[in-house]
Image (cartoon, rainbow, N blue to C red):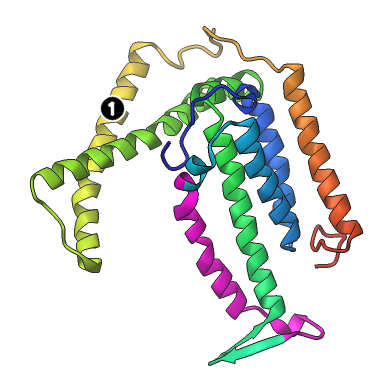
Amino acid sequence: MGLFSYYEVDSFLHHVNPSIKLLSLFLVVLILTLAQDPYTPGLFLLLTLLALWLAGKVPLKVIAKSTWPLVLLTIPFFIFNTLYFDIGRVTNPHILFHMGPWTVAREGMTSGFALSLRILAFIAASLLFVATTDPSDFALSLIQQARVPYRFGYAILVAYRFVPLWTEELETIRAAHRVRGIGGKEGWRGKLEQFRRYSIPLLASAIRKSERVAIAMDSKAFGATDERTYYREMHIRWTDWAFLAAAILSVISIIYILSTLGLTRGFGSIPA
């Protein structure tokens, strides 16, 4: 399994209707966007990873391998949010230390930690959807259940399919360059040279694939009619509604428990 790609296995999450799954995750993302404390995204992150592991049957080793580069991206957010936190909006800030022009407070570190956890929770929610959703099922569900025009649904499917293809194409180009003894320079100049050598073949490959897809669509009269038939029909079952209800109940329970304990911040009605 590569970075954010479909993990094919037989599990409960793999059989949930993609539109219902997307709606459930949208609810979670909405709550995470409004939350300003570290506890809410921390709990959602833990529950999402547990669901991906237990209900999605995605091994923890695979989860870590496919997300660790993005996890490292949260470190700069934590550092900058901590250093540039406006302590003037806090009544009695807890100053930890001074570092040059920056004043580091405990409230700033808490805010930076909360932001990092929110990003990690977004990543986990995205991974849960991508790893357990077949691209073809996703496109069909958008068209049949969400009533998205099939032209846009097919465009989403093509974009969904192209990402792993470009990853494989990049690995092929790298292998070809290694065989020919090209590259190997270190430092930022070597990285720029690699970017130049890889970008042009990738762009050419993308154009060729786009032309082939366009020819295939024209040859089959794609878009000639307003309606079309489907070889496979997607349906919403009672288990899909149960998954949506479980997601809503989890959101309500987490917000209620944390607000009762006085640990939540944000959400408009709760002071940030």
Rendered view: 152 above or below 34: above
Identify residue type, mark 1.
Glu
Residue drawn 62% across the image and 18% down it: 144
Residue 228 drawn at (x, y percent): 53, 10
Q: Is residue 75 magenta?
A: yes
- Judge the density around disc 1: few (<14), some (14-19), many (≥20) Cα neighbours within 10 Å: few
Q: Residue 194 occupies which quadrant of the picture?
A: bottom left
Residue drawn 20% across the image and 65% down it: 186
State whether the magenta stretch is mostly helix, strand or loop: helix
Residue situated in front as seen by the camera: 112 or 55? 55
Residue ranking furthest to the left: 180
Residue drawn 49% across the image and 31% down it: 7
Residue situated in front as seen by the camera: 59 or 42? 59
- Segment tinted magenta in the rendering: 65-94
Residue 9 drawn at (x, y percent): 52, 24
Q: In which quarter of the image is the N terminus?
A: top left
Residue drawn 8% across the image and 45% down it: 180
Q: Residue at label 1?
A: 211
Total labels: the figure holds 1
Rendered view: 223 above or below 3: above
Q: Residue 90 occupies which quadrant of the picture?
A: bottom right
What secondary structure is found at the residue carrying circle 1?
helix
Rendered view: 38 above or below 200: below
Q: Quadrant of the C terminus?
A: bottom right
Residue 233 drawn at (x, y percent): 60, 10
Q: Is residue 218 magenta?
A: no
Residue 239 drawn at (x, y percent): 74, 21
On the picture, is 42 further left or further right than 134? Answer: right
